Amino acid sequence: MEGMRRPAAAPPDELGARDGLAFALFVPDDRPLGGVVILHGAGSCKENHFDFARALRAAGMAAVAFDQRGHGESVGALDGRAVADVATAASALPQGPPLGLRGSSMGGYLALVAGAQLEAAAVVAICPAAADHLARGLADERFDFRADAGRLQAFLAEHPLEAVVPTLAAQLLLLHAEGDERVPVQHSRELAALADPRRTRYVEVPGGDHRSVQHDSELQALAVRFLAKSFGR
């Protein structure tokens, strides 16, 4: 019925696949302020981030969550195509509005790397993993996703965040829990110091753990407001 609001937990507007990448698309009723690609962490999947995608949709933004290669319903192994895969996922968004990226852990790493290459307007990176941290995890076989280890190791070596972040032209929101047991909070402190202070906000949350920030309702609302403001610039 005209004028009725859709339920907050309404399902995605579209489920599909592009170039073997399974995605879920969330689109507001009106023209979106912007479009956001949501990047999950190692061993996770798109469904784990539907809560944030719904929050974006409710705030007038489009969102696409997708399974990275080696995860969920997507085809193939995670490899050197990681940034191209982000671009493929972004192509499912309504074209025209500015692009934003939001990622956590490994997804935070990729959001920063892809944000620089895809000229995103805004990036939200939550507890972003370092390239060498991910490389060690691959070498030690600590990850349970399918990966082309050689090609992925080469990709990581080519894109250390210490070289990426200083050149990032996007508005940047860095979020990290002080109690993160997987990615030390010092990593985000160092990245914040390297980023352009005119475009960067760093939020460090007392306590918490590696997963607490990404699903905290207040911090999700902060990220939604940050993205909407960045798209309005």
Image (cartoon, rainbow, N blue to C red):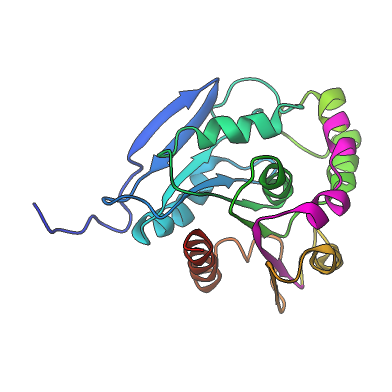
**Closest to the observer: 19 or 214?**
19
Residue found farthest to the front: 233
Q: Position of residue 224 (x, y in %)?
A: 49, 64
Residue 72 showing in the rendered view: no
- In the image, residue 111 sits, relative to residue 187, either above or below, namely above
Q: Position of residue 116 (x, y in %)?
A: 71, 46
**Closest to the observer: 76 or 123?**
123
* Residue at x 51% of width, y 74% of height: 218
Q: Is residue 163 left or right of residue 71?
A: right
Magenta extent: 154-178
* Residue at x 54% of width, y 63% of height: 230
Q: Position of residue 2 (x, y in %)?
A: 9, 53
Magenta segment includes 28: no
* Residue at x 72% of width, y 60% of height: 127
**Closest to the observer: 143 or 103?**
103
Residue 190 showing in the rendered view: yes
